[in-house]
Amino acid sequence: MAPPPPLDEDDDYEDPLEEAICAQRVRLSEQEVCNLWDNFLPRADLIGAPFVTRLTSTMIDQHVMKLPKSLSESCGIEADEEGYAGIRLTARGPVTTCAYGVDTDGHTHLSTDGWKSFLVDKNLHVGQAILITIRNTNRQGLKMMIIIDII
């Protein structure tokens, strides 16, 4: 099912990919674009820009997850910032607490132990397209909630 076309020039039609940060060389299939539309939240619910990428062997097998500098900047994550984030698969999934920090190159990296713990029993695999969104949270001890949706 394709996204609805704009009815006329005055409509508030928005392409979700226009505001999203996409990883280099990521191309989505027509079905993945449709799924992306289903997963987009109202902009007011997000901190910063949504991020679209594909899971890599580095993320899945080596348990290394870094968020791009442009995403960190759009979310107001400061250089040298450290803290704890909640990570969940879908907005209603169980929360895994994960330490994070900002590298000198501006990328936000998630702790290997926290990311590895998140991956347990999620059945995620290399090549899957995902949407990462960041939200505010009022959970004790967490600075943000990272939501991962499979697209």
Image: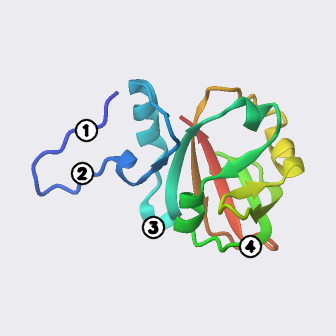
> Element type at marker 4?
loop
- Per the rendering, the mark at residue 4 is 1
Q: Nearer the viewer, mark 2 or mark 4?
A: 4
Upstream in the sequence, badge 2 or badge 4? 2
Alpha carbons under labels 4 and 3: distance apart: 24 Å
Name which residue type carries label 3. Ala
Labels 1 & 2 near each other (Cβ < 8 A): yes
- Provide residue 82's location: percent of width, then percent of height: 79, 70
Q: Which residue is mark 4?
A: 81
Q: Which residue is mark 3?
A: 44
- Per the rendering, the mark at residue 125 is none
Q: Nearer the viewer, mark 4 or mark 3?
A: 4
Q: Which residue is mark 2?
A: 13
Is 74 located above or below residue 53 in the figure? Answer: below
Name which residue type carries label 4. Glu
Alpha carbons under labels 1 and 4: distance apart: 41 Å
Labels 1 & 4 near each other (Cβ < 8 A): no
Alpha carbons under labels 2 and 3: distance apart: 16 Å
Residue drawn 71% across and 26% down?
A: 125
Residue drawn 12% across and 57% down?
A: 10
Alpha carbons under labels 1 and 2: distance apart: 9 Å
Upstream in the sequence, badge 1 or badge 2? 1
